[in-house]
Amino acid sequence: MRSLAVLLSLSSVALASWTKNLNYRSPSEHHPGMGISLHKVNKRNDPSTAFTPSQLNFTHGVASGDPYSDSVILWTRVAPISLNGSNVDSNSTVSGYVPLYNHGPKQVSTAPVCVQFKVAKTSDFAEVESSGTAYTSSDIDYTVKVEASNLTAFTRYYYQFNVCGSNNTSVLGRTKTTPAKNDYTAEVGLAVYSCSNFPFGFFNAFGNPVRKDSVDYVLHLGDYIYEYAGNGDYGYGYSINRVPTPERVIFTLLDYRERLATYRTDLDLLASHQNYPWIAVWDDHEVADNTYRDGEADLNNTEASFVKDGGVAVDQRKMNAVRAYFEWMPIRQVEMDDNLRIWRSFSIGSLFDLVMLDTRQYDRSITDLYWNTEYVHEISNDAGRSMMGSRQENWFYSQLSDSAARGAAWRVIGSQTVFSRVNESVAYGNVDPLDYDAWDGYQANRNRTLNHLYQNNIGNNIVLSGDSHASWVSDLVWLDHANYSSSSGAGSVGVEFAGSAVSSPCPYGQNISLNSANNYSSWLVGANSELQWNDLYYRGYFELRISYDEVNASFFGMPTIINRNPYEISLANFTVKSGANALQRPVAGGVVESGALKSGKVVQTNATNSTDTGTWFVSLDNEEDL
């Protein structure tokens, strides 16, 4: 009788809405080369080959993202047990299962897997507010991405998936909707990340806001994965047993899926996804190093570089990476008819508008590919160069103007690379001091952005940046065009907070000493008038508390990432008052824990090295929750 019910259920898939699972039409409904033919998927449906619930695992926890006031995206993966055996980790209360990647099931099935989801305000699901059924299959790597709708604004929700007709359930997830566009919301908390490189260390930074329960949402500014060989190029992955698969540079769709699956086994990353809705964009390494519209660093349009790049055409490699990213990330589709669009915006009540840019993949002009630095230097101020292409650029300026016109208190801009000028000649000893892969390589584009803000009197701007593997806090200023005072902040039009990496190494060396790093920071702060604080030493993250009166930024450093631990150091705290358009003076209250502060002092509390386990950093006590 049960077999008949299963057959009837699966045969009805032809009548069901396959598109409930957004991944069947991600990343683009308008790009045939990346699409999934649902007609073909349904045509080959053979219910007699269906997996039973006991053959399936929720292999990589759950995730949520792209919250709106009335809906949120929910994600999971439900796949057959791998060839290597059971994926169950009985010691994990965070992820449910910590898998080896499923290279292929023992049993071949051409029938879809049926999954149900439910959402409620309480963890016992006493009153379910949103629910539904979706299907998945090997075509989309057994991932499930659905939109939970008809929700209440700025409300915490719990959600869970189960295999249809069974008690085989995922772990319990937690998420939160945003305030409605014109709602008054006293305060919102964000955790901001970038650059998580698996073989270089554990992702402890992702877990600490969960342990503290300190934010509402997570922003990831890119480099969620790295495409490099699995040993981290220098063998670091082997020394700490953190070697992602495959252990080579990745090119194919399977490669990118497998790399994402490996990263999603880190317990702190799983915990963050399980407890907070994410708003994410890609940087370059989700595809390849120093990507731009027409290529990337290792592909120089020569036959030799094509072979070096795995024999995969640059467009196909980008398509593979983008498709895998959309499959694995809890991200909405935006208007995709013009190619690989990820740039989008969110209105968080009347408090702030969040504008997430794509300054890497969409339509970026040629960048520094290491062999052409002198050429890019020569054209860095060319008016025809753009970080984002004309369509996105015009959209960006419209978003800024519309936000000011509607009366949003703040404008928060997510940028992959550091926006402010950074003269690094003192530290590097270079004749050519700028980073031409960041906004310094697109000076006309930056000037157009600043001109739009100044000419239209748009203030209260907060730029959030990643990519650099260091922490930078600067007044946002149009140098040589504004009468800027470094001591008071007068003439600035906002503030930039750029965060360090979760685990990617310091740009001045993986094993740099604390004293050497702070010396470099002192030189950098002295060479850049708008740069108020810099720290190169610590991997970490920062949190923003945004209210109508002020924005507070708290930077945290991880004392060690060679193992999983709950420790962190409070490095520095900053305030931006509404209407001031600059950091409050004295900056950081005049005292920071590490790095260099332009007008203040560095006070280190008996910090001897990054593996010290003394009392100079904070241990977050509720480790048992993870």
Image (cartoon, grey):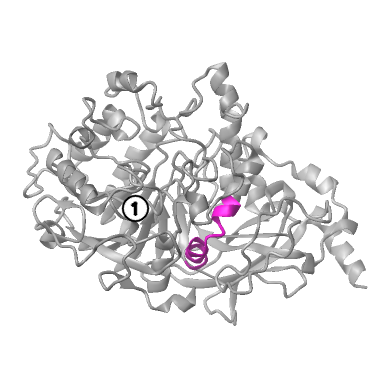
Residue 316 appears in the picture as rendered: yes
Q: Using a 10 Å C-alpha cutoff, classify the residue at mark 1 as few (fewer than 14 neighbours), some (14 to 19) or many (20 or more).
A: many
- Horizontal side, residue 145 vs residue 274: left or right: right
Residue drawn where x is 20% and y is 59% of the image = 574
Residue drawn where x is 84% and y is 51% of the image = 45
In the foreground, 456 or 608:
608
Residue 475 appears in the picture as rendered: no
The magenta stretch spans residue 55 = no
Query: How far across and how far down the image is residue 182, in percent?
Result: 35, 61
Please name the residue that numbered disc 1 is placed on.
Answer: 353
In the foreground, 295 or 162:
295
Query: How far across and how far down the image is residue 97, in percent?
Result: 63, 66
Residue drawn where x is 55% and y is 39% of the image = 336
- Horizontal side, residue 457 vs residue 323: left or right: left
In the foreground, 307 or 288:
307
Query: How far across and how far down the image is residue 321, in percent?
Result: 57, 40
Magenta part of the chain: 260-275
